[in-house]
Amino acid sequence: MKVQLVDIAHARSGDKGDTANVGLIALKPEYYPILVEHVTAEAVKQHFGPMVKGEVERFELPNLGALNFLLHGSLGGGGTLSLMTDAQGKTFSTALLRMYIDVPEEVLATN
């Protein structure tokens, strides 16, 4: 079953220079393995398309049930240089939560 990440996770984002930093946190412990399997660096890069000019790095934080992504080259030079409306990358978390992934129905049935 296809679901948006907003149905199984929450997120927070910010900036470090020209790199957006996005944390994705599972709403329930049983959702974390689904995030690990489906929300890969490649999938995130594809989801953001040309907004992310550099590579996407993923870091797993299993003790927090979270993933952290660094989206290099996504802020038009960073907060002090960029002419982007969101030069600090605050909306990248909301944009990531709009991504669709496949989730087994039995996992969602435990809601």
Image: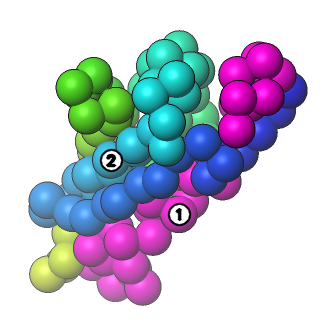
Q: Considering the numbered disc 2 on the image, is that residue within a helix, a strand or a loop?
A: strand
Where's residue 8, x and y in %? Answer: 60, 42
Residue 55 relative to residue 49: left or right? left
Q: Is residue 101 magenta?
A: yes
Q: Amino acid at mark 1?
A: Thr
Image-quadrant location for residue 110: top right
Where's residue 89, x and y in %? Answer: 34, 68
State whether residue 82 is above or below residue 14: below
Q: Amino acid at mark 2?
A: Gly
Image-quadrant location for residue 41: top left
Residue 84 visible here: yes
Give whichever of 69, 61 is nearer the camera: 61
Q: Considering the numbered disc 1 on the image, is that residue within a helix, a strand or a loop?
A: helix
Which residue corresponds to mark 1?
94
Which residue does the image show at 70% across and 38% down from the upper left?
Answer: 111
Tag shown at residue 23: 2
Residue 35 visible here: no
Give the residues in magenta.
82-111
